[in-house]
Amino acid sequence: MTRIERVLAVLAGQKPDRTPVSLWCHFPSDAWFGRSAVDAHLQHLHAYDLDFLKVMNDNGYPTRVAIRSASDLRDFPVLGGDEDGYGRQLDLLRALSAELKGKVLLSTTLFNAWAVLRRLATPKIADRHGPPTLGAPPTEADRRMDELIAEDRGAVGMALDAIAASQANFAAKCIEAGADGVFMSVRDDWVNTPQNGSNSYAELVSTGDGQILGAVRNGRFNILHVCGVPQDLDTFAAYPVHVLNWADRAAGPAIGDVAGKIKPAICGGVDNLSTLLNGKPQDVAAEVRDALRQAGDRPMMITPGCTYDPEAVPDDNIHAMVSAAKGVAV
């Protein structure tokens, strides 16, 4: 099978010739856009012989709204989807599509409205991106979002709606630029906190999620990444996407607990925070084989549960993950 045939077989619930495999990491800031970003993605794809490419997106949300208080949240404009950082990402997608000539599926990274607003509200967040920390105490960004909701919940909702509409416009342009779908990151444990209320995600965020995904309904490779520790994976599994990815090892639930009931294809199986980082190649290969065992008769794709740190993860462990997915003894 070709790389695309292999992935599409899994999406159709059919057994491919072998298990598709991929993984992703944040590139240095000088490879976020332009030719250096194209080269970084292509080198990553070919170095590990991956079956699909998650196109990273660290270009940032295009806004000049300064958030000093909740009242500023009422001034968010709806963007057309090609401004500033949006445009740089669209250029990257066009270049990758031209280079790869339809031989590899491209899923471009996109964050939902809450993740975008959380970052905009906390400008001190470091530019260096890496794997998330699970189960940690609330961060400055979380506390800032709690403060804004307490100050004016309606204004937060207005900003989230405007951001979701902008992200939907951008997502549609991503498909036009050559992406086969989006890799949309969502996270409910940031939202449903004791301070905000247990139903806050459904009240403030889920409609915007649907608007973004509705804009890419003509895509053929839309992945939903449930970051953090999922509070309600069943609800996310009902989203209109082709693939569901989450930290099944570090956060749960385990693949074996959900493989028989969720509709989207499964993408995961390897612990990016522990085994891939600190284990031996044999440990990584064992996790791959265990994930496939848990999935049973259901075909799946092997990936980590989230990004990995390329400065800390041994290259041998990455090759072990890929080899094990391909059925090669490690």
Image: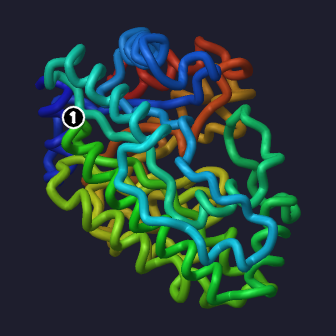
Along the line of sight, which residue is nearer the eye, 37 or 17?
Answer: 37
The residue located at (48%, 70%) in the rendering is 162
Residue 7 left/right relative to 260: left
Q: Position of residue 47 (x, y in %)?
A: 43, 9
Residue 105 left/right relative to 239: left
SS label for mark 1: loop
**Residue 235 falls in image quadrant:** bottom left
Which residue in the protein does label 1 denote?
A: 178
The residue located at (15%, 19%) in the rendering is 101
Q: Quadrant of the N terminus?
A: top left
Q: Is residue 323 above or below residue 212?
A: above
Q: Is residue 137 above or below residue 69?
A: above
The residue located at (53%, 39%) in the rendering is 304
**Residue 127 falls in image quadrant:** top right
Residue 107 left/right relative to 248: left
Q: Is residue 321 visible in the rendered structure shown here?
A: yes
Disc 1: CA contacts within 10 A as few (<14), some (14-19) or many (>=20): many
The residue located at (18%, 49%) in the rendering is 220
Q: Is residue 296 visible in the rendered structure shown here?
A: no
- Kindly identify the amino acid type of the residue bearing the numbered disc 1: Gly
Along the line of sight, which residue is nearer the eye, 72 or 33?
Answer: 72
Along the line of sight, which residue is nearer the eye, 25 or 303?
Answer: 25
